[in-house]
Image: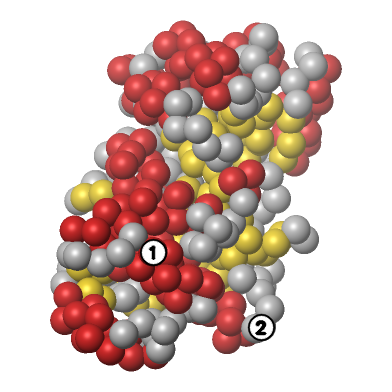
Amino acid sequence: MTNLYSFSLPKLEEKMLSIGQKKFRATQLFKRIYEKNVTDFDLMSDISLSFREYLKENFCLTKPKIFTKQVSSDGTIKLLLELEDSNKIETVLMRYNYGSVACVSSEVGCNMACAFCASGLLKKKRGLTVDELLGQVLVLNDLLKLENNDERITHVVVMGTGEPFDNYDNVMDFIRILNAPHGLAIGARHITVSTCGLVEGIKKYAHEGLQINLAISLHASNDELRNKLMPINKKYPLNELMDAVRYYEKEAGRRVTFEYILLKGINDQKENALELASLIKGTLAYVNLIPFNPVKELEYNRSDNKTVHNFMDILMKKGVNVTIRKEFGTDIDAACGQLRAKNEK
């Protein structure tokens, strides 16, 4: 059966026309499954009985199942979700004062092999389908509804396991459903996609005509260090990555965020901060410094608070817009990929 959650509105319109239905059926179905959260075709009373029977025979509205749930003392919820083929993926709910944020995975496993990331402990099996991407947000919304009828996911970051631009088309359709007025209606500025630096993906993304945010996992200030931390840099060195960033800024008219995880004694020294400021000079970008969540299988440690703030001060004095990301879920398996790796040993 075909999962209705796998269609963006334009593609659902095409599907309806292909089965002899009017185009408006797509909007009608979108309103039912997203605005009204109806998951039973029999309850779609504004649709003819014969078409409801057709939907039941040919389509489904299936979401991932919760395999493991962890709840942090700060309210963060981390889920290990089981897909229909028994593969498992992580998704996280983080609560900020401005809303509820879903951090979603884009692939089952990851081939980027970043040295500090638990996601790379289990290699990529496949990219997630649109309904599997969307299912992560829908499951979190169902949990929130049980806790508080007024709370729902207001922001989405595609920063979980996997490289989003390695699953480009499905991620774009997922974003369109998130943003669609009759879909989940999440504002474009409330959605962020994070890439480790796939240059072709960045340039393609510049022409999507979306106001979605772009974040780039940088984590190093020179090629030698980034080659060690992030093997993708050997294919796309920093000069090519920065050219792509400037291209994106010019074509999309939007700035990027550079994510920079601070690793004790590795990339957190004064010279690293000065190199980083020089590297991004002339761009509109700002830097988000991220405290490292230690992973016992990996050799890295987090920088102490004094080092983090010294790093930040150097960047600020060089005119760089910089923030320190708030930490979530430090008392659970918070690191990306950690919970899945723990359950698949």
| Badge 2 amino acid | Asn
Residue 20 drawn at (x, y percent): 19, 65
Asked if residue 19 shows in the view, the reply is yes
Quarter of the rendering containing residue 331 = bottom right
Query: Label 1 neighbourhood size at 10 Å, few (<14), some (14-19), many (20+)?
Result: few
- C-alpha distance separating marks 1 and 2: 33 Å
Residue linked to disc 1? 24
Residue 62 drawn at (x, y percent): 30, 75
Quarter of the rendering containing residue 13 = bottom left
Is label 1 or label 2 in front? 1
Q: Which residue is drawn at 26% across and 62% down?
A: 16
Residue 256 vertical position relative to residue 44 in the rendered view, above or below = above
Position of residue 87 in the picture relative to residue 310 (left or right): left
| Badge 1 amino acid | Phe
Asked if residue 79 shows in the view, the reply is no
Residue linked to disc 2? 148
Quadrant the N terminus occupies = bottom left
Residue 212 drawn at (x, y percent): 55, 40
Colour scheme in the image? Answer: secondary structure
Query: Label 2 neighbourhood size at 10 Å, few (<14), some (14-19), many (20+)?
Result: few
Q: Residue at x 30, y 64 (%)?
A: 22
Residue 34 vertical position relative to residue 257 in the rendered view, above or below = below
Position of residue 106 in the picture relative to residue 213 (left or right): left
